[in-house]
Image (spheres, rainbow, N blue to C red):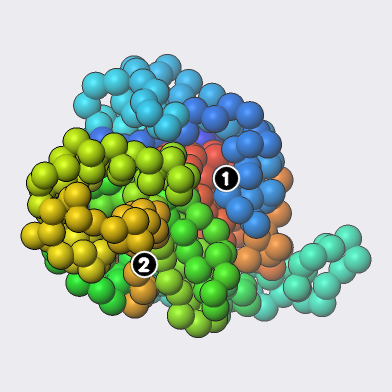
Amino acid sequence: MMAAGRAGELGKKVILLEKNKELGVKLLLTGKSRCNITCAEFDLRKLVEKYGKNGSFLYQPFFVFGVKNTIDFFEKRGLKTKTERGLRVFPERGGAQDVLAVLIKNLKKNNVEIMPDCKVLKIAASKGGEPRPEDSGREKAGKKITRLITTRGDIVADSYILCTGGKAYPGTGSCGDGFLWLEKLGHTIAEPRPSLVPIKIKEDYGKELQGLSLKNVEINVWQKGKKSFSELGECLFAHFGLSGPIILDISKRVGELLAKGSVKLSLDLKPALDFDTLDKRICRDFQKYNNKMFKNSLDDLLPQKMIPLIIKLSGINPEKKVNGITKEERRSLVKLLKSVKMTVSGLLGFEEAIITTGGVLTKEIDPRTMRSKIIDNLFFAGEIIDVDGPTGGFNLQICWSTGYLAGQSV
């Protein structure tokens, strides 16, 4: 929608082919229907760092149409925004439906023809000739898309922008067909994998703690006895294992590690306190509840729902009086609170993933224009490109920026 709107605004005759009966089906799901439009990080270098190893590809799109441009785009069209915790930008009132309404109104204003319920069956292309010196980076000069074969007839155009997304939420129409077309056309696809997705664990903790949200905890990720990385924030227990913001954000890296072998997690319930400080804290609690049973002594320290599991894992008799707990038992409890160990059994699939990681290799796309280096009249925007970010509006910003630049380039 952003790409089509920008191309139409600059006077091009544009047709937007939509697989679904309505536009914006996936957009309506974002931010639990509130639509986290972007992240209010206005420092370009810091913003790009959030996108990991392929983030540098986004320098030019973000320079042309960055976070401030995105906020201005919606505000100038009547949608006021507000910035919440974590620099997350949302509509001040309403949600995803209002964001969609702005985009559709922009399409109509710029005379974009919308063709809903239109599935592309095949992309036909000419073979092209041998590479020329001036076509640096192109596989074959002159290779072009000649037409689209669709369920509503053939479409012929000067330029084509592919915005099919990835494979996340396949129920919205994102089944990965764009990747299949592009491989046939000669593009290389980094294997699509679910990302920003909950993590399954082998232990039954999720069933015991289902629905429990823990704020300000730390997840440490281990492989072969070495800590790979850690993340601070909020996590949520679900029947299969773990979800919540920090879990979604680490899922991509956990998935990459899983491809190399088993992965273990350790949950630090009190990351703000080092071992000795936490030990002193527990000593104070034990003095306070001196004559109570162990099972009734942890109310000040842990959420009620967490206490039975911690007691079980500690190995301390729940009926034991607090004044009878040994120093070794107490310090063992401290160690447990600093490291509740879990074993990753896998990630949930594309059905539960917010985004897809993988896609068209960035080296095969010109970041100054979003144009394919292999097919002269093909451009890309959004999730189909092999670059992605954490939760918090970062992935929609890719869509706005690359869409705008692709539309402007054609």
The answer to whether 222 is drawn above or below residue 69 in the figure is below
Q: Residue at x 23, y 56 (%)?
A: 325
Q: Earlier in the sequence, mark 1 or mark 2?
A: 1
**Which residue was labeled with disc 2?**
341
Q: Residue at x 91, y 66 (%)?
A: 133
* Residue type highlighted by circle 2: Lys
The secondary structure type at the circle numbered 2 is strand
Q: Is residue 330 visible?
A: yes
Residue 28 % position (x, y): 25, 44
- The disc at residue 373 is none
136 or 315: nearer the viewer? 315
Residue 117 % position (x, y): 25, 59
- The disc at residue 50 is 1
* Snapshot quadrant of residue 33: top left
Residue 67 as seen in the image, left or right of residue 311: right
Residue 255 % position (x, y): 46, 70
Residue 222 as seen in the image, left or right of residue 351: right
